[in-house]
Amino acid sequence: MIKKRMLAIVLVAVLAMATACGEDNSNLSDNLKDTIKNAVEEGINAAKDNNSSNDTEPTVAPEEPTEPTTEPATEPEETVEPEEPVEEDAEEEADVIEFGKKGNLGDLSIKVKKAKVAKQFRSGLFIFKSKKKGNVLLRVDLSAENKGDEKIKLFPFIYNPSEDIITKLVNDDGDEFESLKMIGFSDDMHDRTVKAGRTEKGALIFELPKKAAKKLKELKMKLSMGEEEFDFELK
């Protein structure tokens, strides 16, 4: 903008001088001379101001250093490991009572006194044999004491498993053998009632293969009454 102004002033001065030269110098007035002189000086001064302004570099205020913002690192989320499935406790084994010792079921105290294998048993006028060829009979003699205040029925054939005492033989192979109800067998403990404070003695008969009967150590007599149970060793 300043350069254009200076150029216009110089141009005006030059035109004025050219006009003056074309006329008689004697007729040139002093006022015109002063005008031309002032125009030239103004142009020169404007040029100097422009140069001085161009020589001056703008001063830029230094920017303050920006401190880096340190954001806290994101903590990793905790990894929750899946809980291992809790294995259900294996079914607890029944207590094992040594041969000749007592085991308790409710108010009953039971004791196995003897276990004997035979092809047949005699009771009074009756002889009892196995019904299946190749099988033998196992007689288990026991006693049952009632320590309660009410009478208890022993080994009923029609029974309630949550209330009545029941029994069976089991071996290591998982075979099971039920006791037999022997009609005419005077020592039979099935359906016998033991009064409060009294003790009943008798026997239970089981039929089983000879092979199983030869391994009495592997046989156990399992007794239970409701949720209570235990096993008797037979030898």
Image (cartoon, helix red, strand yellow):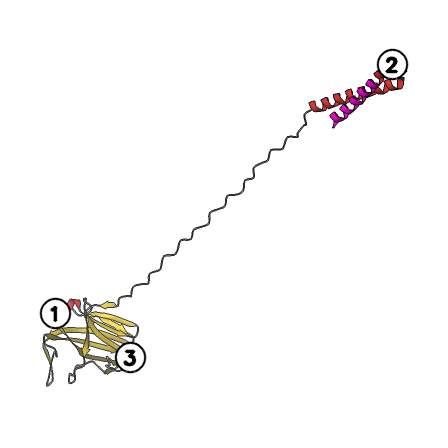
* Helix, strand or loop at mark 2: helix
Horizontal and vertical percent for residue 195? 26, 82
Query: Magenta residues, as a range?
Result: 1-19
Of marks 2 and 3, the one in the foreground: 2
Whichever of labels 1 and 2 marks the residue nearer the N terminus, that label is 2
Q: CA distance from mark 1 to mark 2?
A: 164 Å
Quadrant containing the N terminus is top right
Q: Is residue 60 magenta?
A: no
**Looking at the picture, does residue 234 appear above or below residue 52?**
below
Q: CA distance from mark 2 to mark 3?
A: 156 Å
**Looking at the picture, does residue 219 appear above or below residue 76?**
below
Mark 2 surroundings: few (<14), some (14-19) or many (≥20) residues within 10 A: few
State which quadrant residue 148 falls in.
bottom left
Please name whichever residue, 173 or 163, is drawn nearer the observer in this view of the structure. 173
Mark 1 surroundings: few (<14), some (14-19) or many (≥20) residues within 10 A: few
Q: Is residue 34 left or right of residue 96?
A: right
* Helix, strand or loop at mark 3: loop
Q: Which kind of residue does numbered mark 1 sit on?
A: Lys
Q: Which residue is mark 2?
A: 25
Q: Which residue is mark 3?
A: 160
Horizontal and vertical percent for residue 172? 19, 66
Q: Residue at x 87, y 19 (%)?
A: 32
Q: Quick one: which residue is furthest to the top in this view? A: 26
Whichever of labels 3 and 1 marks the residue nearer the N terminus, that label is 3
Q: Which kind of residue does numbered mark 2 sit on?
A: Asn
State which quadrant residue 224 falls in.
bottom left
